[in-house]
Amino acid sequence: MPLNDYEIEHNQTVRTLAPECTLLLHSDGSFPLEAPCRIALFGNGARNTLRGGTGSGDVYSREITGIEQGLAEAGFTVTTKKWLDDYDALYAAAKDEWRTNLKKGKRGFAAIMSAMGSAMPEPDYDLPIDYEGDAAVYVVSRISGEGMDRTEARGDMRLSETEIRDIQTLDKKFERFLLVLNVSGVIDLSEIPDVRNILLLSQIGGQSGLIFADLLLGRSYPSGKLSTTWSALEDYCPVGEFGNQDDTRYLEGVYVGYRYFDSVGVKALFPFGFGLSYTAFDIQTTDVTADGTTVQACAHVTNTGGFRGKEVVQLYVSAPSGKLDQPYQALAAFAKTPELAPGESCNVTMRFAMEDLASYDVDDQAYILEPGSYILRVGSSSVDTQAEAEVVLDRQVTVRRAKAVLGSCGFKDWAPCVHADACEDPAPRTLRIDAEAFTTLETSPAPAGDIPTIVKQMTDEELCLVNIGDISGGFLSVVGNASNKVAGAAGDFTSAFVDRGFPLTVTADGPAGLRISREYVVDKKGVVQPVGNDKLTIIGDALPKSIVALSDRFARKPKRGETVHEQYCTMIPIATAVAQSFNVQLAEALGDIVGSEMERFGVDLWLAPALNIHRNIRCGRNFEYYSEDPLLSGKMAAAVTRGVQAHSGCGVTIKHYAANNQETNRYKNNSLVSERAMRDIYLKGFGICVREAAPKAAMTSYNLVNGVRTAEHKGLIERILRDEFGFDGVVMTDWIVHPMFKGGKYAEPQSWKIAKAGGNVVMPGSKEDYKNLVEGLKTGLVSREQLEANAAVMYRLAKELNEARDA
């Protein structure tokens, strides 16, 4: 079938924007190429190019173009088709053996969990590479996904022996050689330090092959920067625990990502904020001023190279260490230039509020700014900066009072014994800000809204039903396909009361675009049913036949006379790639694509953006998240939110709230984190997104924080999200299917505890959840007043989205 106009338009938008999400790690000036030529193309991603991660990150697009196809369409001649054919055969045999081993001894939910997110390591191979061409390209692909963390094994986070051998051989043989990284996260490149040209293509959606051809020919250019530090695996902070089954201690405190590298003086292979383009830039800071508590830095940027491009200017601040130990520096603002021709210049302005630099002090139960010099650094990466000014604060300022509500983690945060000196370079400008310029904010309970009549008139049982998603449970809920209105959507809530004027709300997964079925039919009863087995591809291709057979109940072939409807969606770049653009306008434009398709297909809430921190590069779900830095994460999530919610009746669901930083035993794992680290690192991006973009919904995570499930954590939901951040939307759980939670150290979630903590709705909903809530209400464990308040929030959102869509 030909593409619809909206598909063509959205694909073109992604093709235009995505190059800004890519960057060069090494460059000797050999690229771009002048014209299509003969290309020797190798690597596991050359033909089977990855467009995104697995799990909820998948999207069903009609048009998918890999690198081999994209080069062919651009006029290149690929000289290595035999190598690619031979590799495909070798890979298929290795995959069959891997699938067989993965299935052994696993049944039911155990089979689903082992398949979800599983990725076969790249196998070694013995294929000759004595092919000719005017240039050579080797594409390394790595997949990761929901349900499984990455490993440090060869073929996963390390290059395989044969990859290393062939990459080095090709780099020496060909005058023009390009290593392309079609990856979802960090891989260790320390064993190939001298490769002359490396392009981090990342995973940028269904147009990847066409986008790469544009980059190779200079029709577009890379202009991204790393949103996460890339280095040898042994260089990363060894302090914090990761991957434990029951309890994972975040011992490193606030020293996450570049905050660790910069503070202890470890030189990364490729630091945070680093990225090369086809050209070069000169950055000169022209002025730094303060107005009240707002600081502004202006820079003059000149393209000093021979190709057009864009530069990202970054502003970091080194805060004084006093009673609170501080990292060497933290990102405070950034700005991206417009396209600059060779020799062309422009001015950029970066602003931040001093209040945004405040750290949480448990003793004071407040966010504070300590007295001393705040050093401002401007440059093109976290390690390529110059000290441009110091802002002097004469005494301590309390920015906001906020009660500690997250409980004890049981340890004191680590801090480096030898700390890099933040004041080694004198700043040419000194600004002074009077402590009297600040206003101390108090944190008080968010005002309770009125309870609508429709809610007050509900019986106790009806009220419980509202606080539970549309009851389905079972296999569909595991794979995120529990909607009765939109085929392949994740789930619905409040459909039981549509006749009374309580609108239905439909949620669909993401985060790289809408994840709904490609095609569907409507049967005689008006029930929407997906066509084909779309959902099975989401959780892996190693499922036992018994599970595949079970799925046939939910995804079938159309019967004679039934009309098959289409709902193909556009896959945008993964969140990490979006953050690499350092361009909030780009992120908003990608959100606009998603919002447009939500309107088209009747989806009310998108279960994205996800903005957990890249705490550890092994997290299998990092591709869904933006960065190791909370400011960049929050700014990007806010921009995507604005893009989506500019469309009538469309809302986002920020997730996973909070400290969801590993997939290992994700349903039962307890994140032990200090109150300061939670607030300064893991919650900060959520606060930025809420304050700047007012997302309509939020989703709690599966894990516990300091012994309490996030969905049952009143401190997280009511005290911080609502009272401090000002969130007034619906709080839902992640998809609770009870067999996944049974056993282990910690009890499974209970719907009455979720409701009592201020969680509005348990998703996707089951009879077990409903019975638990009814019993909790009857026995006084949760009050009717709480359930009414929860339902009132849901009603207001449902009415708002429904009326906006109908307007």
Image (cartoon, rainbow, N blue to C red):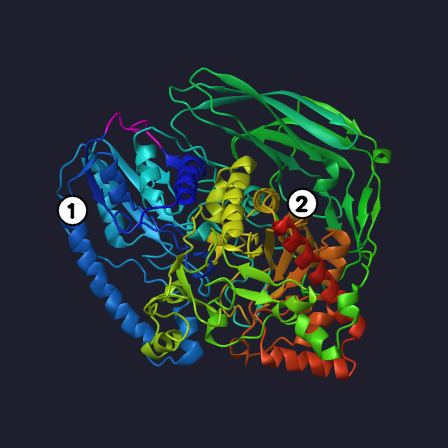
Q: Position of residue 332 (x, y in %)?
A: 64, 37
Three-letter code, disc 1 = Lys
635 on left or right of 205: right
In this figure, which residue is indicated by the disc labeled 2?
326
Q: Position of residue 803 (x, y in %)?
A: 66, 52
Mark linked to residue 617: none
| Secondary-structure class at tag 2 | loop
Q: Is residue 452 above or below residue 769?
A: above
Q: Please, what is the dominant secondary structure of the magenta stretch?
A: loop
464 on left or right of 594: right
Q: Is residue 115 visible?
A: yes
Q: Position of residue 27 (x, y in %)?
A: 35, 31
| Secondary-structure class at tag 1 | helix
Three-letter code, disc 2 = Gln
Is residue 425 shown in magenta? no
Q: Within the image, what quadrant is residue 149 found in?
A: bottom left
In this figure, which residue is indicated by the disc labeled 1?
81
User: What are the residue bounds of the magenta stretch?
Assistant: 27-35
322 on left or right of 336: right
Q: Is residue 616 visible?
A: no
